[in-house]
Amino acid sequence: MKSVIIFIVFCLPFSVFAQNISAEKLLEKSIFYHDPNGNWKAFKAQFTVEMTTPNASERTSNIRIDLPKEHFSVKATRDTTTTVYTISKGKCYMVLNGKDMDSVTAKANNMSCERAELYKNYYTYLYGLPMKLKDPGTNLDKTVEKKSFKSKDYLVLKVTYDEAVGSDVWYFYFNPETYAMEVYQFYKTDENGNVKPESGEYILLSEEMIVNGIKMPKVRTWYYNKDDKYLGTDTLVEK
């Protein structure tokens, strides 16, 4: 009888187990995997990201995030150009090749506080996942799906956002054994809120690096959904 039970457990379809976990529980398990000590709420760290893209030189970005002090900065260098964007307690500062930029000179050099805010949201969101999925305005679909992606099975969360937050539809792919986040994917929507199937990108996550006690994906590789065209790679590096 014991051998029969074991056979049934291991041979049941994967989808049966996917149905037994709620979206909230799956997210909790993934957050515990990536941030077991709950460090994200008081995250304060500096890390470096090297970005490589086809037909362009490498860009190195040194990023500082201090959530308790409401501080963010990114110093990015590509070739002979270095820019620094800082947002600290809502105030914006910009520097180009060591020189402070006012609004007029910043605009002349294609820099703006809007771009600074964009960088803050981008890096804080991506490197704060999956913890950022607990933020207000984030809506988890109640159904946990089982999907195969690149010949591997995943538990998948569908996420939408309140209108004030964003209109894209995101899918987060979790390892069904460890609950590590290994892929995410997003699609644009039309004026009626319907997904545009040829839009958006998917991002493959590989390796890990510990930053402030949080397991972050070391390598992010980006592709278009529509044709699997390679876009670029972001890599966390020790600096």
Image (cartoon, rainbow, N blue to C red):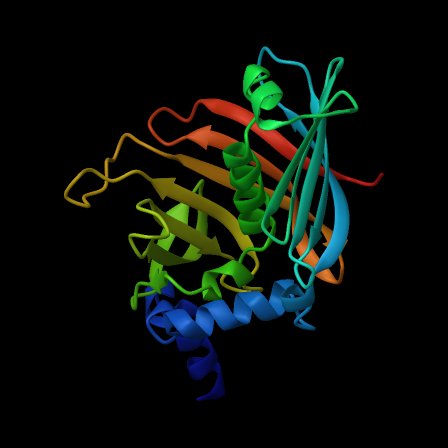
Q: Nearer the viewer, residue 45 or 220?
A: 45
Relative horizontal placement of residue 233, taking residue 157 as reference (left or right): right
On screen, residue 31 above or below 105 = below
Is residue 60 toward the left or the right of residue 103 in the image? right
Q: Nearer the viewer, residue 192 or 141?
A: 192
Tell me which residue sits at (45%, 53%) in the image: 173
* Camera-nearest residue between 146 and 172: 172
* Image vertical order of residue 232 relative to residue 71, above or below: above
**In which quadrant will I find the C terminus?**
top right
Left or right: where 99 falls relative to 40: right
Is residue 206 placed above or below 80 in the rendered structure?
Answer: below
**Residue displayed at 41% across by 43% down:** 185
Q: Is residue 134 left or right of residue 71?
A: left
Tell me where residue 89 appears, x and y as whole percent.
63, 54
Tell me the residue at 51%/38% (across/down).
118
| Residue at the farthest top position | 55
Residue 210 position by quadrant: bottom right
